Amino acid sequence: MSKGYANVVWVNSREANLKRKLREHLQSLGFTKSEDGALQAPGNCKDTIRSLHRAQREERLTANQKFVSLKGAKLMRFFASGRDIEPEKISPVLERVSSGTLHGDLFRLATLSWSVPVSNGFGRRLRYLVWDENNGKLMGLIAIGDPVFNLAVRDNFIGWDSQERSARLVNVMDAYVLGALPPYNALLGGKLIASLLRSRDLYDDFANTYGNTTGVISQEQKKARLLAITTTSSMGRSSVYNRLNLDGIQYLKSIGYTGGWGHFHIPDHLFVELRDYLRDIDHNYADQHGFGQGPNWRLRTTRAALSALGFKQDMMRHGIQREVFICQLATNATKILQMGKGQPDLTSLLPAKDIAAQAMERWMIPRSKRMPDYRDWKSENLIRLFGDQAQILRTQIERAEISQRACQL
């Protein structure tokens, strides 16, 4: 090498470019660095949290562009306007759904209206629509799936060490979709939907579907029972899930907050580049994403790529803490999860229909009398939540209405 190049520092252009993209993206979200170099979120109010998820949500809508275009207009008839609701006659019904069906498509479309994108779940899954049988409109959604392996507040509440958790986590699920759709949400329908987690219907569906399964990781035959369901508020502290009691029974209990670690602030397009980078350096996490290959593969893969690029571990700490709740379906659920033995006490576990009736009397009917603004909601208002697909949906619905009127002439 000639003398003139002796002090030149050679830089991997791909690494430099990827690091620049990551920094620019985080700056665009409003993240700054604290004095110790850790990420610092621009705030923790609900509007800020929605803003931080905007890029992730736009990617999700783009990925579902074809689906919304093909199925959206046909499915919009299932969403209610305020005028469709007669509060005293609301009749909630729980329906389990499967992929590849009309109602499976409806579940998928409804989740796309969520301001904070939901995951598709992984491993074991049970998905439900909650209908208002009185008018045939959709009230809300429930989906439970395999829980994350590492959740300190859950493990501390139960009293697990790592070995006990590995052996008994099979009896716990996580509600990764849980909520009411407008205008039912304005009537505190979210409380009714959340209460249905602690229903005999979910307990029996789980027993029939997953009661005798072989663990993917352990390869052991397990007699699984649905003893508890965790869920996490997407907006920090939850006013919907707190004080969720019916007839002296606590349906959800707050057990603390997450540590503010995760990967939602790393969007899909950058995650793809991080995976490609790991492939280039022959890192085994790049393509190790089958279920059973360890907890939260995407989190671990992102962490590995950021570490390889020279970023601190704090890059994964976005600082948005979420409240964690647990629903104990058996009265003695915690004791069984601690000890690994015992017969579940299900004497207070009611059918979904009975729980819904109590929730109607406790929350929804009184709310409708105090705050009648729900009547102003129009189902068309939901369309604007579908991003770039909104105008396509409006055009499709208008064409369908014109065609229907023409057939009536």
Image (tube, rainbow, N blue to C red):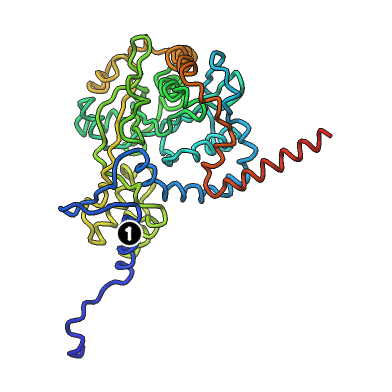
SS at circle 1: helix
Instruction: Name the residue nearer the viewer: 266 or 309.
Output: 266
| Image quadrant containing the C terminus | top right
User: Residue 392: horizontal and vertical position, in percent?
Assistant: 62, 48
User: Residue 325: horizontal and vertical position, in percent?
Assistant: 31, 27
Name the residue located 31 percent from the left edge and 64 percent from the top edge.
Answer: 20
Name the residue located 53 percent from the left edge and 47 percent from the top edge.
Answer: 64
User: Residue 124: horizontal and vertical position, in percent?
Assistant: 42, 33
Q: Is residue 281 something that shows in the picture?
A: yes
Q: Which residue is mark 1?
A: 22
Q: Is residue 22 above or below residue 155?
A: below
Q: Is residue 298 left or right of residue 110?
A: left
Q: Is residue 32 left or right of residue 29?
A: left
Q: Is residue 119 above or below residue 86?
A: below
Q: Is residue 70 left or right of residue 228?
A: right
* Within-10-Å neighbours for mark 1: few <14, some 14–19, many 20+: some
User: The disc labelled 1 sits on which kind of residue?
Assistant: Leu
Instruction: Name the residue nearer the viewer: 42 or 13.
Output: 42
The quarter holding residue 280 reads bottom left
